[in-house]
Amino acid sequence: MAVFSASGVTKKVGEEIARIAGADFFEIVPEKIYTDDDLNWMNKQSRSSIEMNDLSSRPKIAGTVSDMDSYDKLIIGFPIWWGVAPRIIDTFLESYDLSGKTIIPFCTSGGSGVGRSDEELHKDVSGSVKWKKGVQINRPDEALVKKWLDEVL
Ligand SMILES: Cc1cc2nc3c(=O)[nH]c(=O)nc-3n(C[C@H](O)[C@H](O)[C@H](O)COP(=O)(O)O)c2cc1C
């Protein structure tokens, strides 16, 4: 499992999902951590606003998954930013050869559903990949997470 979390919500949910699934956990840490000012969506000039207005923005990631080849399934978690996944998720997906894997997205959000945030990511991955439909999981209810994992893993 790989998770990006700017303010901790997705990380907490992801850690719980990883525990239930028995999955390894990798946090997608930006080279430059997002400050509160960076995350201010009211400000059109904030870092997050500028990145989300630029489809080609690819914020750099500190660290890599060294043994990506050894996994055949990848759960990827992210917060919804302006209806879609933060651009750093595009950076992550474009950084690896994921062909042959099953990719299982989940998101947290302030209210929006997963929408097209998962499908928007399909373009980042070449080769034959099996995408599962993304889900929104704002709180990790163990029974619901188990049911979901049974369906997707
Ligand atoms: C820049 C920015 C844009 C956001 N846009 C949305 C949005 O479009 N819809 C929504 O429901 N929540 C939105 N949110 C709220 C986050 O998705 C939500 O708080 C999420 O759980 C944060 O996860 P994190 O703590 O892992 O970063 C936005 C938050 C930020 C910082």
Image (tube, helix red, strand yellow):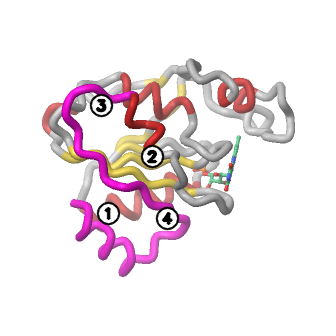
* Mark 1 neighbour class, 10 Å CA radius: few under 14, some 14 to 19, many 20 or more: few
Report if the CB atoms under discs 1 and 2 are less than 8 Å apart: no
The answer to whether residue 44 is magenta is: no
**Label 2 to label 3, Cα distance in Å?**
21 Å
Q: Which residue is mark 4?
A: 137
The kind of residue tagged 2 is Asp
Where disc 2 sits, the SS reads loop
Residue in the foreground of this view, choosing between 27 and 40: 40
Q: Which quarter of the rendering shows the C terminus?
A: bottom left
SS of the residue under disc 4: loop
Mark 2 in CB contact with mark 3 (< 8 angstroms): no
The residue under the point 33% across, 51% down is 104
Q: Residue at x 16, y 43 (%)?
A: 72
Which residues are drawn in magenta? 124-153
Q: Nearer the viewer, residue 25 or 102?
A: 102
Dot 1 or dot 2, earlier in sequence: 1
Q: Is mark 3 within 8 Å of ligand 1?
A: no
Q: Is residue 13 left or right of residue 152?
A: right
User: What residue is disc 3 on?
Assistant: 65
Residue 95 occupies quadrant: top left
Mark 2, residue position: 118
Judged from this view, the residue extending furthest toward the right is 43
Residues at discs 3 and 4 in contact (Cβ within 8 Å): no
Q: Is residue 21 left or right of residue 113?
A: left
Foreground disc of the pair 3, 4 = 4
Cβ–Cβ below 8 Å for labels 3 and 1? Answer: no
Magenta segment includes 135: yes
Picture coordinates of residue 124, whole percent (x, y): 39, 28
Give me the disc on residue 4: none
